[in-house]
Amino acid sequence: MTSPAPELNLSDYANRLPGSPVREILHVSQQPGMISFAGGLPDAAVMPEMPVLDNLAAISQYGTSDGESSLIKELVKWLGEEGLPCSEEQVIITSGSQQGLDLAARILVDAGSDVLVEDPTYLAMLQVLRGLGANLVPFTLDEQGVDLAGLESLLQTRKPRMIYLIPTFQNPTGYSYSEQERRAVAELIDRYDVTLVEDDPYRVLNYDNAFTRPVSSYLTSAKWLYMGSFSKMLWPGLRTGFVIAHPELYPWILRAKQATDLHSNRLGQAIIGQFLKEGRLPDHVAKLKAHYQKKRDYMQKLLQQYLPDSVRWQLPAGGMFFWLTLEQDTRSVLQDGIEAGVVALPGTPFAVEKSADNTLRLSFSQMTPEDMEEGVKRLAGVLAR
Amino acid sequence: MTSPAPELNLSDYANRLPGSPVREILHVSQQPGMISFAGGLPDAAVMPEMPVLDNLAAISQYGTSDGESSLIKELVKWLGEEGLPCSEEQVIITSGSQQGLDLAARILVDAGSDVLVEDPTYLAMLQVLRGLGANLVPFTLDEQGVDLAGLESLLQTRKPRMIYLIPTFQNPTGYSYSEQERRAVAELIDRYDVTLVEDDPYRVLNYDNAFTRPVSSYLTSAKWLYMGSFSKMLWPGLRTGFVIAHPELYPWILRAKQATDLHSNRLGQAIIGQFLKEGRLPDHVAKLKAHYQKKRDYMQKLLQQYLPDSVRWQLPAGGMFFWLTLEQDTRSVLQDGIEAGVVALPGTPFAVEKSADNTLRLSFSQMTPEDMEEGVKRLAGVLAR
């Protein structure tokens, strides 16, 4: 007698959690000769040398769940300058801002909870929210900015557990909220008392002096969690990000952090703390901005020069991405592009409700000028078909 | 008009997640003059110097969700020698084994799912499982070992999503399954087709040549996840642990890892990988064992010398803890102990169903001989009251 193969008996979370929808494309982009705009990695060429720590023994032992006080102190100082005054008792160091997003969603969202999101939005947060079974309630974000009326009408009819925003150099669209939009959105969030999760990994990559004051800093009554990261500024391999929490939410996210992995790795925290303490960040950020701005400007020039007039986009004021709107469906572009030796990320996996099937996200962060030009030419050839 | 203070609207997970029940005691143990057996930290005095990496740039960029291949390769070699043959395609590096436990529980357990656990068991796993709303189904683990008949009758009547075991130098009891118990438990797990989560952070701290072959290695059909850690061997501050997964569970836990924090910090992984590659682990483990065995033996001598005859315990064959069973309730002992300048961890938070209110967990890992003797004397004075 053969018994049937035992089935996997997994949790709802596991069964709901989507795989990475971009893994295959990133795999294709590894092919020899392929020019890829698909990734979203910072440029290793502009990562600084790590400071040498004189006392490794001091960070060998278990640490505290909130993080290294040396780093937290420097971080609070820096965030004050960036427009988010906070105290050391509001900071939790996380394993990259991805962990912050996961923790925030876990303490706020149940299966079936309404969660307001920009449409399109960051795909790895969609993955987190779908894993938890959240009911995604999208409002439009496009070249005209936030659909404030649409957002308000959703707030009137729903009782969302959280609203997730990437107000500064959004991934994927590159859009950045104006000062007026920041005020207006904060006012709505306060009025309807929703908890804000603000995701802000790109803020220092600001090429046009865009207004970047955190939306969280405008809130007067609503609760908020602000996520930041050193991954786009320094060394993503160290997995060091942070959550700044409204005081009432702080104990809850700290507890979740503690239950999840006790604390973040201390060596990465100490290295970044030391880098900040040595006062190296301002010069480094200036260097980063110049480095990426040059790439962005050249990319803009190439896109204007080679792409058909039918393709629309806005110059991103910061971040790492151009967001192109095409006349044709991205799937055929992707397929033809692979044949022509160029790959970009289709917008589809960033979409919630409104189709993004005619969009492409192009990253310029890691490209050499030569590859950038050749890649844009190849793409233009595909689009002209 | 004053509006009522807005209530926090948190998830079921947040509302269920217990805080750390031992935080206060660990806080008390920081008081000047206090001798503490309460912690569970490895001894920093026996942590080796970290190897110097010659190429920090190589680990600055984002990495892969499974972990550094250099570390995974060394780990597979070592685990083969330890009695758990596995392939590189089964390994996921985690942020300490705590993250492995959290990920395992997340992909296996829903609110209301039955989960079989030893009683008593590791309190931070109880925290994880309670956060998820698991229905804890305990079976007895005491100085007589595993209650196999009790376990089988639970398996006959329940359909548990997982069984959580710490078969080797258990925290808190110090108990280690015999070879026969390992075989018998594995046979039951196979027969009733439950997924095993095996937690094994203490295995190298083996003072009496105890039999430590992983229970997972005996399974022929049931699925399993094996959790290990470098925290008790090397540097806990680096937060580097690992999950070895049954091939069918591997893609699910990898996906959860990716959604949770993308990947573990690369610097810690590279440092530990380098340490293993240099062949330094065997000598270091020998040194660790000698170091802790000496402490354990002296502790045993002191307990025999000073404690009243009414106190019962077994010599732990490995790990970091003595587990004392008293005649009196631990709460009064704790209170009187603090006044007398000695603190130990009450067993209560490790208990699931069976009361552990007359037990104490004493850690010897960090104690000097002088403090150990003075501490045991003080404790004996309290118990003699």
Image (cartoon, coloured by chain):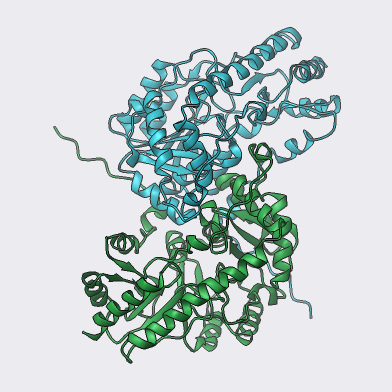
Chain colours: A cyan, B green
Residue A53 position, x and y percent, is 52, 41
Farthest bottom residue in view:
B309
Looking at the image, which is closer to me, B110 or B322? Answer: B322
Decide: is B124 above or below B165: above
Looking at the image, which is closer to me, A248 or B294? Answer: B294
Farthest front residue in view:
B370
Instruction: Determine the image quadrant of residue B107.
Output: bottom right
In this orientation, does residue B263 appear? Answer: no
Residue B126 position, x and y percent, is 44, 66
Residue A207 position, x and y percent, is 55, 15
Instruction: Determine the image quadrant of residue B272.
Output: bottom right
In this orientation, does residue A90 appear? Answer: yes
Looking at the image, which is closer to me, A5 or B208? Answer: B208
- The residue located at (69%, 71%) in the rendering is B82
- Dividing the image into 4 quarters, which one contains the C terminus of chain B? bottom left
- The residue located at (69%, 60%) in the rendering is B75
- Residue B378 in the figure: left or right of residue B260: left
Residue B208 position, x and y percent, is 58, 82
Decide: is A81 above or below B143: above
- Dividing the image into 4 quarters, which one contains the N terminus of chain B? top left
- Residue A72 in the figure: left or right of residue A377: left
Decide: is A317 above or below B245: above
Farthest left residue in view:
B1
- Residue B34 in the figure: left or right of residue B229: left
Decide: is A3 above or below A205: below
| Labels in figure, total | 0
